[in-house]
Image (spheres, grey):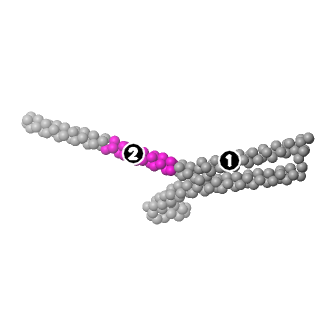
Amino acid sequence: MKNNRKEVALSHLRSRKQLEDLLSKRLGALENLQSTLWNVERAAGDVEIMKSYESSTATLKSILSHPSLQREKIDETMDAMASASQDAQEIDETIRLAAEPGNQIFDEQELEEELRALVAETEEERRHAADTLRIEMLHREQDAISEVSRDQVKPHQEVQQATKDHEMRLGGVPAHRREASVI
């Protein structure tokens, strides 16, 4: 009988060793799969980050390519502002000199007409520069609003679809009607 029990014990030990070996292999495979899953999730996150970077870069390039931000347009606007400032300084200088006693060797009426013409010209240049600047700002605002609107429409639609899907899973009854029936 002792022999018979020894055989059974050895058989159980062999089975236990085989099961332990199988368990060890399965745990190793599970760890390997979990590690792979973490790597996949991390890579997917990296892809999303890169897409965000690319989108941001494209948006910035789009804004910077706007005609009002081109070097020639900037130089033109700055030159117009410098010219208007110079005209204003000349007008101030003329008025200051005309107001000093002893400097009235010019015909007063002629000076006043010239001053009016210079003031009118300066005001026209300022209005033109201001109008140009306003138009450029409106274009920038419209571009920014269009960009933001495009970015916000998609998430809003996704939320609406998710809400509809959720309501359909709850029996097709919208949330506000379900709450009213409970009350």
Q: Quick one: label 1 or label 2, which is nearer the N terminus?
A: 2
**Residue at numbered disc 1:** 79
Amino acid type of the residue that numbered disc 1 sits on in the rendered structure: Asp
Q: Secondary structure at mark 1?
A: helix
Image position of 34 with respect to 116: above or below = above
Q: Secondary structure at mark 2?
A: helix
Tell whether 38 sits left or right of 99: left
- Residue 30 rendering spot, x and y as whole percentages: 30, 43
Camera-side residue: 53 or 127? 127
Q: Which mark is residue 40?
A: none
Tell whether 145 sits left or right of 174: right
- Residue at 26% x, 42% y: name it: 26
Magenta includes 51? yes
- Residue 50 rendering spot, x and y as whole percentages: 45, 46
Q: Can residue 46 be seen here?
A: yes
Mark 1 closeness class: few <14, some 14–19, many ≥20 residues within 10 Å: few
Mark 2 closeness class: few <14, some 14–19, many ≥20 residues within 10 Å: few
Please identify the quadrant where the N terminus is shown: top left
- Residue 70 rendering spot, x and y as whole percentages: 59, 50
Q: Which mark is residue 43?
A: 2
Report the span colored magenta: 33-58
Question: How far apart are the two marked residues, 1 and 2, measured between alpha carbons?
Answer: 51 Å
- Residue at 50% x, 59% y: name it: 157
Amino acid type of the residue that numbered disc 2 sits on in the rendered structure: Ala
Image position of 68 with respect to 38: above or below = below
Please identify the quadrant where the C terminus is shown: bottom right
- Residue 173 rendering spot, x and y as whole percentages: 48, 64
Camera-side residue: 127 or 59? 127
Q: Name the dominant secondary structure of the magenta segment.
A: helix
Where residue 143 sits, quadrant-wise, is bottom right
- Residue at 69% x, 49% y: name it: 80
